[in-house]
Image (spheres, coloured by chain):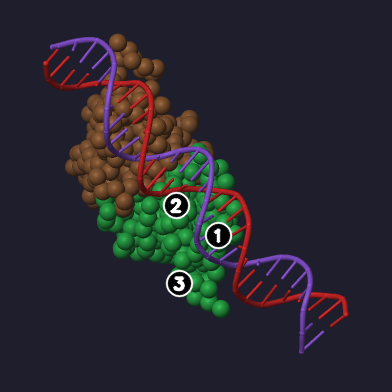
Chain colours: A brown, B green, C red, D purple
Amino acid sequence: MSTSRPALGTTARDRLIAAAHQTVRAKGYAATSVDELCGAAGVTKGAFFHHFPSKEALGVAAANAWTARAEEHIFTLPEWTRLPDPLDRLLAHIDFRLAMIEGPVEDFTCFVGTMVQEAYLTNQPIRKACQASIGAYAERLAEDIQAAVEQHGAQIDALSLAYHVQAVLQGAFILAKAQNDPARARDSVAHLKRYVSMLFGKTDQP
Amino acid sequence: MSTSRPALGTTARDRLIAAAHQTVRAKGYAATSVDELCGAAGVTKGAFFHHFPSKEALGVAAANAWTARAEEHIFTLPEWTRLPDPLDRLLAHIDFRLAMIEGPVEDFTCFVGTMVQEAYLTNQPIRKACQASIGAYAERLAEDIQAAVEQHGAQIDALSLAYHVQAVLQGAFILAKAQNDPARARDSVAHLKRYVSMLFGKTDQP
DNA sequence: TGCACCATACCAACTGGTCGGTATGATGAT
DNA sequence: ATCATCATACCGACCAGTTGGTATGGTGCA
């Protein structure tokens, strides 16, 4: 078999989703054409509309795939996710996200965060898929935060803080895009870590 | 006299910029067509290309206008900008931005933050105009922060914290868009205020 | 034989941008 | 005062290229 150029072993559908993740993060949803997606995935238009009834449907599928990807790469695979102390996990999480902010901007930014900016008013299916993705991330993170709150005693709404982490990350990505440089973005995540440390009593950074 | 429909007294050029602020915040830059902008501004295509050589040029002009608008509405007109204590001004600033997060999402979100997401790689003139706008805001805010640092004594890089304020705001806007509801966004700005309060020694909120 | 998977040709609608032309008012020589 | 000259602001038909999407047909495996 082996139909076309990139990434043998993956299906046309998977390659289209991967192309969406990459291209939309670089150029945005509206500016990314179906033809371009097909080109990046090494697939023809016929294949595209065989797997997805519309461009919008690919957007939704790619958002769902993004959720799964985050669950795996951020909440499952890294070693620190098995740390015993939930506060250690939380701080390691922030360190991990900070360390990701490096290299080309389009490689570390958030697919759903980028897409929802353009679609939140005009495309409800996409908006809802992005909301679900961000929500899943926040709820997962809130588990550790809640455990840390219970273990270390602090006056914090876990889910609210989890969404704040998301907000800082998304905002940091915008800074990186505007400056074409991740330095200020990393700075901002460092402020987030300082805040969380202070919330949990660690008077200041080491 | 009185050439055309809306907002007497404003010129076609001003109306096009206002239409860009509104429409781009609602649908994004790429998804907003020149025809649509003309319609919203009550202006013909001929007028558009009389005032701007290209759609991109309008984007740049609108970003510059956005900078001026922020300087006026956020740093000059409000009463609290004349408070004597710089820390009071800083906290009032955050309260002010928090209070703005209300009503339709497309009315309180940031034009340059929205636009730079789509243009940062493909359109350098627009990216730079957005960078300048965010930079001007941060530098202006850093003045108060620096004064507060000097007056209250704290270990803070003023400009870095100012950019962090921007990041939290931009991230909060993304939350509001994804959820189609400003509640979580306000929550996040409340976290920011708590952080700044803690940085300056106020152990916790009133 | 049937069906999942894909390729190619094609289409109507829309895109940013161009172009010839007009309406209006300021300027300056007579 | 009058009128030619010019610049600015604007109009709207038009253009070539691109868009998302469709229609149809082929191909290989169950």
Mark 3 surroundings: few (<14), some (14-19) or many (≥20) residues within 10 A:
some
Query: Which callout, 1 or 3, points to the residue nearer the camera?
Result: 1
Could you tell me the amino acid type at mark 2? Ser
Mark 1 surroundings: few (<14), some (14-19) or many (≥20) residues within 10 A:
few
Q: Estimate the spatial distance between the alpha carbons at disc 1 and disc 3, rounded to whole Å.
A: 17 Å
Give left or right: position of A58 versus A108: left
Q: Can residue B187 be seen from the camera position used here?
A: no
Disc ID at residue B33 = 2
Q: Residue at x 51, y 58 (%)?
A: B45
First reached walking from the N terminus: tag 2 or tag 3: 3
* Observer-nearest of B43 and A163: B43
State whether residue B54 is above or below residue D22.
Answer: below
Give left or right: position of A200 versus B135: left
Q: Estimate the spatial distance between the alpha carbons at disc 1 and disc 2, rounded to whole Å.
A: 14 Å
Disc ID at residue B46 = 1
> Residue C3, how many percent across, how many down?
15, 22
State whether residue A4 is above or below residue B81.
Answer: above
Position of the N terminus of chain B by quadrant: bottom right
* Observer-nearest of B42 and D21: D21
Disc ID at residue B6 = 3
> Residue A16, how many percent across, how many down?
33, 28
Q: Residue at x 44, y 62 (%)?
A: B39
Could you tell me the amino acid type at mark 1? Gly
Chain containing mark 3: B
First reached walking from the N terminus: tag 1 or tag 3: 3
